[in-house]
Amino acid sequence: MSFTLAIVGRPNVGKSTLFNRLVGKKLALVDDQPGVTRDLREGAGKLVDLRFTVIDTAGLEEATDESLQGRMRKLTERAVDMADICLFMVDARTGITPTDEVFAEILRKRADHVLLAANKAEGRAAEGGVLEAWNLGLGEPIPLSAEHGEGLNELYSALLPLA
Ligand code: GDP
Ligand code: MG
């Protein structure tokens, strides 16, 4: 069975890096697809034997008149509603921020299935942040390094029972 996975979280935690890794080369033209806004990028994801649609929430990095908080909420809600599973990503190096808490609250209320990923988890510097992520109340954080391709086995194991 196929499913839709949305990667959500505040800017700069590594969402697009993971998206690129899951989508691979098929990424190239996603921005040019008709009907796909620049804020939500969609691609064909692949992880071991799983095939799924993956959504990257972008656009929060751009300056507009609307507040970051407002855009963040709208964009996240749209992604959550499109998704079967949400991968909520935090940055294990900076630890949990108040913005992360806002995301966690949206996901607790709105998402069917949430997986928590503590990204940038390569090396000792991330250990404290991974532990801190437990406090979000979204279960066990999956330590990931999207950039170095670490933790993908654990991500696969977490997705498998939900797929
Ligand atoms: P997004 O804004 O959430 O989409 O984040 P990006 O994917 O654009 O990544 C933001 C920054 O974090 C970039 O400089 C990435 O190279 C870096 N980054 C992403 N994944 C990792 C990781 O696993 N480890 C480290 N150390 N840096 C990462
Ligand atoms: Mg991005």
Image (cartoon, grey):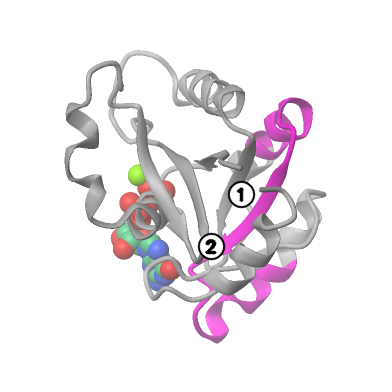
Which quadrant would the N terminus be assigned to in this image?
top right
Looking at the picture, how far across and down is residue 42, in whole percent?
A: 37, 35
Q: Residue at x 82, y 49 (%)?
A: 137
Left-right relation of 52 to 129: left
Q: Quadrant of residue 157?
A: bottom right
> What residue does disc 1 label?
97
Left-right relation of 82 to 27: right
Q: Nearer the viewer, residue 117 or 160?
A: 160
Q: Nearer the viewer, residue 53 or 71?
A: 53
Mark 1, Cα crowd under 10 Å, few <14 / some 14-19 / many 20+, is few
Q: Amino acid at mark 1?
A: Thr
- The residues colored magenta run 102-131
Q: Can the viewer see residue 85 in this picture?
A: yes
Helix, strand or loop at label 2? It is: loop
Looking at the picture, how far across and down is residue 47, in whole percent?
A: 48, 61
**Label at residue 94:** 2
Q: Is residue 119 above or below residue 148?
A: above
Q: Amino acid at mark 2?
A: Thr
**Is residue 35 one of those drawn in magenta?**
no
Q: Is residue 64 above or below residue 80?
A: above
Q: Is residue 26 above or below residue 39?
A: below
**Is residue 104 one of those drawn in magenta?**
yes
Q: Is residue 119 above or below residue 66?
A: below
Disc 2 + disc 1, Cβ < 8 Å: yes
Helix, strand or loop at label 1? It is: loop
